[in-house]
Image (cartoon, rainbow, N blue to C red):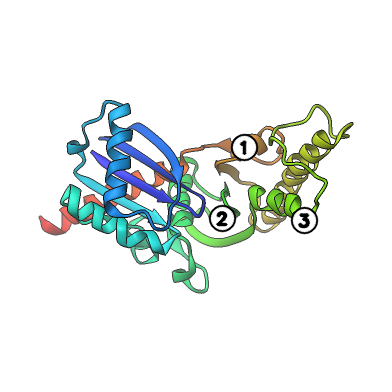
Amino acid sequence: MLLAFDVGNTNTVLGVFDGEKLIANWSVSTEHSRTADEYIIMLKNLFHICSINIKDVKSVIISSVVPQTMRHLNEMSRKYFGVEPFIVGAKISASTGIKIKIDDPDELGADRIVNAVAAYTLYGGPVIIVDFGTATTFCVVNERGEYLGGAITPGIGISTEALFAHAARLPRVELKIPPSVIGRNTVHSIQSGVIFGYAGLVDAMIRRIKKETGECQVVATGGLSGLICDVSEEITKHEPLLTLIGLHLIYNRIHAKTHEQSD
């Protein structure tokens, strides 16, 4: 079995693949100081809940945008699974089928490489990937599988927290679609501004990108992607587990190339 980690700034998504099948996935808070021993305790509990034998894990692949977590995850993989983990980064892009065409490939976050691999494999190109995480990222892959670049904007969570922190009389509200754009109370007004306003930002960015790429698929992923997909006019596909799919694809491709070289 393959254990996949997608470590984001706010949450870490984990998935277990048995062959080609994703048999379990979880989302936990990202803790910068979580040790290797704490990781394995957490994993044992999650595996137990899903009746999965943790001893069946034979490989680990990691995508992380939080450098502080890497030492502990590496240690956990070696100490408890006896394997050297596959680490996703710009240096392995040649093995993924995606060519990175930005000015400095080392600047590109591992999650964006993984999403590009998954989206291009699933939908072809050109394709725009919108990832709703701590930041909302827009990534563009053309028809030749070349990663062209993208855009980064503050995420929905960051935006709303800034609003609540600097406006003393505005309450924290549940993020859900209000009954109408014109809010008749403070809660609905905030929900309208956040949800419809953010969808407007996303749609405007997508339309501007399409002026440079032409018509293409638009794939949304990330924690709040489902909420924005419901009101977006430009998003055509929703794949909440896109990063885990990408990690599985990358592992298979690297694993296959390793076997070819050893034959």
Q: Are marks 3 and 1 in contact (CB under 8 Å)?
A: no
- The quadrant the N terminus occupies is top left
Question: Which numbered mark, 2 or 3, is in the foreground of this view?
Answer: 3
* Residue type highlighted by circle 2: Cys
Q: Earlier in the sequence, mark 2 or mark 3?
A: 2
Who's the residue at 81% across and 33% down the image?
Answer: 188
Q: Is residue 218 left or right of residue 108?
A: right
Alpha-carbon neighbours of circle 1 within 10 Å: few (<14), some, or many (≥20)? few
Which picture quadrant has residue 249?
Answer: top left
Rendering coords of residue 5 (x, y %)? 36, 48
Residue beneath label 2, please?
139
Q: Is residue 154 visible?
A: yes
Q: Is residue 177 left or right of residue 157?
A: right
How far apart are labels 3 and 1 at the CA level? 35 Å
Rendering coords of residue 9 (x, y %)? 50, 55
* Residue type highlighted by circle 3: His
Residue beneath label 3, please?
166
Who's the residue at 48% across and 69% down the image?
Answer: 107
Question: Which numbered mark, 3 or 1, is in the foreground of this view?
Answer: 3
Q: Is residue 260 left or right of residue 28?
A: left
Q: Earlier in the sequence, mark 3 or mark 1?
A: 3
Alpha-carbon neighbours of circle 3 within 10 Å: few (<14), some, or many (≥20)? few
